[in-house]
Amino acid sequence: MAGVEGGLVDVDPYDDGSFPTFGWLQGINARAVLAAVRGEGPVPKTGLATRRHLRALGLRPGGQKPLAALEWRGGRRMAHFYRIELALPKRTPTLAQEAALDRAMAARQTCPKCARRYHYCLPLRTQGCCTACDTGTEPTPCTFVPPARHELAT
């Protein structure tokens, strides 16, 4: 039997069965991970990282379960830690997937009244159009994407 030696069971009386929780920069190899995310050091081979850290390092959790939790702002915010050595490389989207994402973003960024595509998502559920159409003002040229000109080769 595992954990049993001479009829005794190895039990930790202080273990309540919950996730281990770390504060800011208290995780395993936390300073090295944060330096790698900022581009100030190499990517560590071991340690713990959140999903955002893994994404910045070009990795993804890869189906592994969270190992611990990161807590900040007095316990009001929390993120899960994953092991770096079990993380897999990020998958790159195909051209069809990128085109579908661009069409979806274009639907959220294009005003149905003036047909301008903006650099940000419009409040279509609440206003139904862009702020310029709603207030009757002219938008500044830096806020929307200029219309594309298609010049066919002859």
Image (cartoon, rainbow, N blue to C red):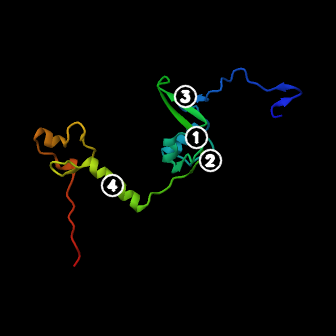
The residue at the far bottom in this view is 154
- Reading the chain from its start, which is encountered first: label 3 or label 1? 3
The residue singled out by tag 4 in the image is 102
Task: Mark yes or no: residue 39 visible.
Answer: no
Amino acid marked by disc 4 = Asp
Position in image of residue 57 (x %, y %):
52, 48
Q: Nearer the viewer, mark 3 or mark 1?
A: 1
The image quadrant where one finds the C terminus is bottom left
Task: Tell me the SS state at disc 2.
Answer: helix
Q: Nearer the viewer, mark 4 or mark 3?
A: 4
Q: Are marks 1 and 2 in contact (CB under 8 Å)?
A: yes
The residue singled out by tag 1 in the image is 82
The residue singled out by tag 3 in the image is 23
Task: Tell me the SS state at disc 4.
Answer: helix
Q: Is residue 154 above or below residue 53?
A: below
Q: Are marks 3 and 2 in contact (CB under 8 Å)?
A: no
CA neighbours of label 1 inside 10 A, class few (<14), some (14 to 19), many (20+): many
- Reading the chain from its start, which is encountered first: label 4 or label 3? 3
Q: Nearer the viewer, mark 4 or mark 1?
A: 4
Label 1 vs label 2: CA separation?
Answer: 8 Å
Name the side, left or right, on which 4 lies relative to 52: right
The residue at the far right in this view is 6
Position in image of residue 60 (x %, y %):
53, 48
Amino acid marked by disc 2 = Leu
